[in-house]
Every structure is written in C-alpha cells, then in structure tokens.
Amino acid sequence: MSFTVRVPAKVNVQLSVGAARPDGFHDLANVFLAVGLYDEVTVTPADGLTVTCSGPGTDQVPLDRTNLAARAAEMLAARYDRMPDVHIHIVKDIPVAGGMAGGSADGAGALVACDALWGTNASRSELLDICAELGSDVPFSLVGGAALGIGRGEKLTALEVGGTFHWVFAMADRGLSTPAVFREFDRLSAGFDVPEPVARQDLLVALAEGDPDALAASVSNDLEPAALSLFPELAATLAAGRTAGALAALVSGSGPTTAFLVRDSSSAAEVVTALRASGTCRTVRTASGPALGATLLEVSMSEPG
Ligand code: ATP
C-alpha cells in the first residue's frame, strides 16, 4: 500500500528580516502565499528508510537522512515508538534551492504521508510541532493558503485572501544557499540599524481584498539585495519581467527564483514570452495562489512497479 501527498511551493509577498539574534537566527515577518507548483511525496512500506527523487535538479537533492522528508519520517516514527521503515519517493517540480521552500514542502508531505501509512493519526498541532522542529518554512507547507509567520517564520497566523493572484516564476540555472543569503544580508546590513520586522497592514488588506495592484504596491523582500549581490544576473531577469508588464517583480524568498505578479492569465502569457526570449533564466512557469497545503492525493493498494 502506498500514499501520495501533494505539497505546494510558496512565494513570500513580504519577507522582513530583523537583525541577527545571539543564536544566529533572524526574527522575521514573513507573509507566505502558497502557489500551485507542487512536489509529490509517495511513501511505501520498506525494510529501513530509503529516499529516491525524480524531476529537475534532483542531482542536488540529498538522498540520505539529511533529506527533510527522511527527517520528517524519522521524527514521526520516534514519537510513536516505531521504526521508520518506509521508502519515500519525491517527484520534484518545485525548483531545488530556489527560494520556494521545496525541501520544506517535502518534509511536510512526508509527514502527512507517513502519518496516513502508519495510522498514527497525529493531531494537527503535533504535526505542526514536528514541522517547526524540521525548519522555519515547514509549518507553512503543511497549512498552505496564506499566512503570516513570525519568530523564525514558523509561528503562523492564517490570513484571509479575497481572490486568486496570478504569478509567473523564472527559475535560474543554479541554486542559492539560504544560509549564504542570510550571511550576505548580515554583511550588507553591518553598521546599520535593522528595524524590528512587522507585517505591513496595506499588504494584509491587499491580500484580503484580492487586489493585485494593491498587492504589487506593497510586496517587499529584505533578502533581495543580498540575493542580487550573490547572483547579480537576477537583475536582468527582474527587468525583463517588469518591462513585459508585470505588476511587481521580486526575488522569491532567498532566491534565485524570481516572482512576477501579473493581473491575469493573458498578461502572464506576455511575461512568460518575454522572459523566455530574454535568455536570462533556465525555465519559466505560471502558477496562481493561494493553493492548498499538504493534501493526501491517492492511496494505492498495489506495490509500485
Ligand atoms: P527555502 O525557500 O525554504 O529557503 P529553498 O527552496 O531555497 O528553501 P530547498 O529546495 O528547500 O531550497 O533546498 C535547500 C537545500 O536543502 C538543498 O540544496 C538540499 O541540500 C537540502 N534538502 C534537504 N531535503 C531536500 C529536499 N527534500 N528537496 C530539496 N532539497 C533538500
């Protein structure tokens, strides 16, 4: 028997970063929007814990116990005093090391899938606890929709969204390490007063009203200068999308994926064409949000062939 869970990518419509804390982490005010680009995580009973992965960029995905999906399975098994005897297969569509929380999505997906496979029936709050231990972005991958994350980004409050927002994403030909981008943020902000991160009210209203123009006027990403400093070619990608009529262009999370908010699907098509023609990115995709969080898709009674 196997279980498959579908998990969305995210874009940060606001990512405000505070000064580095003594523990090295940063306080954040993170407004997450889940978008319809998905990884699928399938779990099947096995002897021991194994991970396989297919899709673009999989050569950069660890297949050992450092994979967030494997760690999620181990943590759930430890809590329920059982062996993590499971094979995890990840079909990746979320860009690897792209600033769209792909690894976090797989962690949340594996957790929900193993919970179903093992019949552990963990409560939502237990699952969220494990997610928060796995990483700052993992709880959001579980819940989806839109949410404000504070602390390291893991303390979530669900947000109302009054409509569908259309996006175009440009994937780069290499990844960016999130810790490296935070280190660059620290380097660039050294000697400056970094304000306390807080959610922007105009942005929350724009989300609640489903108003793309108001959202475009209020999106922000404090990590963008650091991502651009480590990956200067992204400036050309952002400019190409803006010129083609995107309402807003920003680096997604720690990058290097760039995100373009567009008014509707016809405007999305124009931005896609311009980005492809610009030759500044590896691939271009459209997706809309909000999208559902980790969702159990399918139960298969036969062994996968
Ligand atoms: P975030 O947006 O949460 O900062 P990201 O989208 O930039 O993350 P990920 O795709 O999550 O980046 O990958 C970051 C690193 O995490 C990878 O380079 C890889 O070494 C490691 N990793 C661990 N588990 C996974 C996984 N299941 N999928 C992808 N990467 C993983």
Image: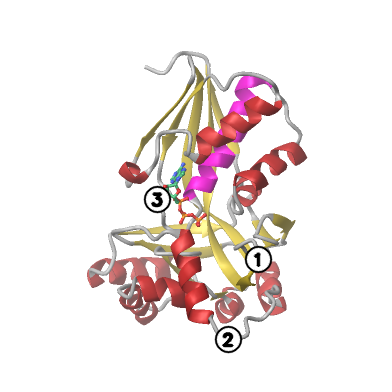
Residue holding disc 1? 22
Q: Regarding mark 2 in the picture, which secondary structure is present there?
A: loop
Residue behind mark 3: 96
The main secondary structure of the magenta stretch is helix
**Mark 3 C-beta to ligand 1 under 8 Å:** yes
Find the distance from the CA under tag 1 to the CA under tag 2.
Answer: 17 Å
Three-letter amino acid code at disc 1?
Pro
Query: Which quadrant would residue 145 be assigned to in this image?
Result: bottom right
Q: Residue 63, located in which quarter of the rendered image?
A: top left
Q: Nearer the viewer, mark 3 or mark 1?
A: 1
| Location of residue 182 in the rendering, given as x and y in whole percent from the top left corner | 50, 67
- Mark 3 and mark 1 lie on one chain; the one further toward the N terminus is 1
Residue 296 visible here? no
- In space, the residues marked 3 and 1 are separated at their CA atoms by 29 Å
Quadrant location, the C terminus: top left
User: Hey, what amino acid is under mark 2?
Assistant: Phe
Residue 133, given in percent of the width and then of the height, sits at 65, 45
Image disc number at residue 192: 2
- Residue visible at 32% across and 47% down? 57
- Is residue 235 visible to us here? yes
Scheme of colours in the image: secondary structure
Where is residue 146 drawn, in percent x and y? 65, 58
- Residue plotted at (41% across, 54% down): 97
- For the point 76% across and 41% down, the residue is 125
Asked if disc 1 is less than 8 Å from ligand 1, the answer is: no
- Is disc 3 in contact with disc 1, using a CB cutoff of under 8 Å? no
Q: Is residue 212 left or right of residue 55?
A: right
Name the mark on residue 239: none
Name the residue at the front extreme: 22
Q: Residue at x 68, y 59 (%)?
A: 147
Residue 115 forms part of the magenta stretch: yes
- Magenta span has 246? no
